[in-house]
Image (cartoon, coloured by chain):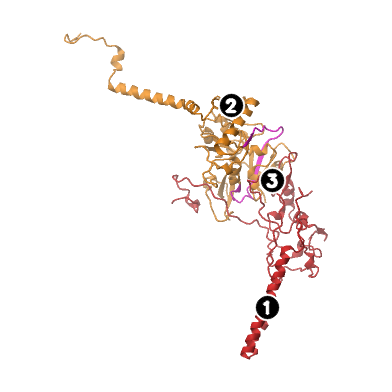
Chain colours: A orange, B red
């Protein structure tokens, strides 16, 4: 016992010995508290938006698309129409078209015919209300047209940014790539909140109100088919297509992922998708896979079709083919 | 079988219309120019008093036929493609048809108005006065009458010499391009517009000559629409493809 009689005996607990309360530990604790408070504020940010009136309580408490009753959906769509009219000056017609019975959509693209003119990519922009800085800004278009060297299907040497005076160039061929609507879709499997799923007719759709913007699906997609809204979509009044569908081309909020839906607002209405309507060479074939009289059935029966990245096992509903 | 998907509006047009007016004014103009030239020549001849060297050169030129004036033919109204409310999509066919459905569209131009005077010309490679803009590069076809009917110029000719109506031009092409015709009938060659579901609406289909010039059928190259902008701060694209992308700073 080497107690110094000049100093009083202070009982020291283990806590005091191993976690002494000095300046360093105090600053550590203060920093951790500040960080925690900042995280809490960030987590409660939707409440601030609610306070400012940017979103309503209904938006905040809205349930997943597949749990909504028809009445809820009608009310939500009417609210979206009103909001669009207030913000952008155009009142769209938002519908909720359901999958048709006995219909499974399929798409085929004739690589012998495609000349790479990008009419499809620009028509996609006009139809689907993507964000664009300039009228010809196809960054958010769902279609990427690849220019490949003849002789192989080598995507690693392909070029999206080609801008020749005339297409097709003699030693190149062109491959537009968009969502393949896979039967084994990786994007729907990785979604942590099940905001994207496959419908009865094979279309992979996104619930824009349920998506949390984690972009796992973009990383999982082997075809680069998904686009992310980094900011609020920039759209002029005259660029808005008023024919909209809830799951397809209604104007997206900021921070969600969007994708090609084979122009669901058109095809579930019996019409052809926009990219097919404008193709000057007729390279695109669309139809019902289950109908033996359809064009797509004829292609699968009589042409040699090619599936892009077959080895990843996604079983797409999008086929490429060559003919003479 | 092949059928027209929809009837379209016909615009009645007066016979010869304004093309005829242009022709008559051109005639008057040519007559006036001829008179002026004649007056100048006569004046020079009278002034110089020498006949032989002054008139020799114009005399040799008048032996050849002057080229006929070019008459602008208005493009007839095109058949509709797709649904009318899709105005935001550019659904125009790659080529405007001049020959198809001219009579149905109220066009009074009748090929036989000239060709009952001029008999059928078998060889293409003789010099022509009319149809000088036609350049026949269609496989090994060298003869107009491979496709055109020898006595009825408003129609095309079948294997057995019978006539194929002008509106049925698809059947003419099917004479040689059988597999393509089969694909076209199945909707796989060429483009269909409108409704894939026939129960919900009508469908239109482009016909051969709305994309292919029948005298030069290879599909023509076209300028591409603008590409996406290259990310300004990203790595450069591979050198073989770094050709002319705009917005790329090397």
Residue A64 is labelled as 2
Reading the image, the residue beneath label 3 is B84
Disc 1 secondary structure class: helix
Mark 1 Cα shell of 10 Å, populated few (<14), some (14-19), many (≥20)? few
> Are marks 1 and 3 in one subunit?
yes
Disc 3 secondary structure class: loop
The answer to whether residue B106 is above or below residue A202 is below
Q: CA distance from mark 1 to mark 3?
A: 52 Å
In the displayed image of the protein, which residue is found farthest to the left? A6
Using the rendered image of the protein, determine whether residue A284 is visible from the camera's viewpoint: yes
Quadrant of the rendered structure where residue A201 is? top right
The answer to whether residue A52 is above or below residue B229 is above
Reading the image, the residue beneath label 1 is B34
Chain ID at mark 1: B
Query: Is residue A19 shown left or right of residue B238?
Result: left
Residue under the image location 55 percent in, 40 percent down: A224
Residue A77 x/y as whole percent: 61, 31
Residue A236 x/y as whole percent: 55, 43
Quadrant of the rendered structure where residue A85 is? top right
Residue under the image location 60 percent in, 29 percent down: A76
Q: Which residue range is magenta in the image?
A: A92-119
Residue A310 x/y as whole percent: 60, 39
Residue under the image location 42 percent in, 26 percent down: A39
Disc 2 secondary structure class: loop
Chain ID at mark 3: B
């Amino acid at each position: 016992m080497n107690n110094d009689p000049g100093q009083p005996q202070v009982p020291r607990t283990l806590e005091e010995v191993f976690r002494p309360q000095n300046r360093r530990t105090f600053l550590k604790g203060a920093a951790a508290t500040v960080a925690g408070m900042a995280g809490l504020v960030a987590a409660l940010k939707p409440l601030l938006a609610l306070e400012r009136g940017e979103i309503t309580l209904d938006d905040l408490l809205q349930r997943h698309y597949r749990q909504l009753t028809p009445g809820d959906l009608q009310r939500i769509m009417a609210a979206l129409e009103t909001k669009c009219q207030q913000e952008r000056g155009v009142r769209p017609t938002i519908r909720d078209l359901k999958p048709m019975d006995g219909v499974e959509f399929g798409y085929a693209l004739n690589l012998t015919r495609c000349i790479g003119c990008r009419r499809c990519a620009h028509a996609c922009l006009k139809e689907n209300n993507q964000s664009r800085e300039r009228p010809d800004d196809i960054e958010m278009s769902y279609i990427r047209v690849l220019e490949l060297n003849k002789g192989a299907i080598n995507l690693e040497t392909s070029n999206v940014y080609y801008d020749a005076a005339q297409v097709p160039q003699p030693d190149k061929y062109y491959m537009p790539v968009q969502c393949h609507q896979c039967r084994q879709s990786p994007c729907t499997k990785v979604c942590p909140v099940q905001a994207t799923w496959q419908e009865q007719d094979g279309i992979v759709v996104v619930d824009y109100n349920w998506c949390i913007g984690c972009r796992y699906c973009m990383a999982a997609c082997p075809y680069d088919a998904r686009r992310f809204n980094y900011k609020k979509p920039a759209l002029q009044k005259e660029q808005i297509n008023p024919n909209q569908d809830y799951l397809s081309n209604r104007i997206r909020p900021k921070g969600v992922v969007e994708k090609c839906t084979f122009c669901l607002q058109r095809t579930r209405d019996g019409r052809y998708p926009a990219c097919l309507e404008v193709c000057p060479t007729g390279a695109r074939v669309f139809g019902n896979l289950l109908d033996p009289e359809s064009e797509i059935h004829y292609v699968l029966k009589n042409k040699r079709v090619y599936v892009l990245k077959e080895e990843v096992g996604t079983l797409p509903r999008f086929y490429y083919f060559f003919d003479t | 079988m092949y059928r027209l998907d929809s009837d379209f509006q016909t615009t009645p047009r007066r016979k010869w219309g304004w093309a005829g007016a242009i022709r008559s004014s051109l005639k008057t103009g040519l007559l006036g120019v001829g008179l002026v030239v004649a007056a100048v020549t006569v004046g020079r001849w009278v002034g110089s008093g020498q006949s032989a060297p002054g008139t020799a050169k114009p005399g040799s030129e008048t032996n050849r036929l002057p080229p006929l004036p070019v008459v602008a033919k208005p493009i007839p109204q095109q058949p509709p493609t797709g649904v009318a409310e899709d105005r935001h999509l550019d659904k125009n066919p790659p080529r405007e048809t001049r020959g198809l459905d001219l009579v149905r569209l109220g066009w009074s131009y009748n090929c036989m108005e000239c060709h009952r005077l001029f008999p059928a010309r078998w060889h293409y490679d003789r010099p022509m006065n009319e149809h000088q803009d036609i350049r026949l590069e269609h496989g090994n076809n060298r003869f107009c009458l491979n496709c055109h009917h020898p006595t009825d110029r408003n129609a095309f000719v079948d294997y057995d010499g019978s006539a194929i109506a002008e509106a049925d031009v698809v059947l003419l092409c099917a004479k040689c391009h059988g597999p393509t015709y089969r694909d076209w009938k199945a909707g796989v060659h060429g483009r269909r517009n409108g409704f894939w579901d026939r129960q919900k609406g009508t469908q239109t289909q482009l016909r051969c000559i709305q994309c292919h010039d029948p005298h030069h059928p290879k599909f023509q190259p076209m300028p591409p629409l603008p590409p996406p902008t290259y990310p300004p701060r990203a790595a450069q694209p591979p050198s073989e493809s770094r050709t002319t992308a705009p917005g790329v700073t090397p």
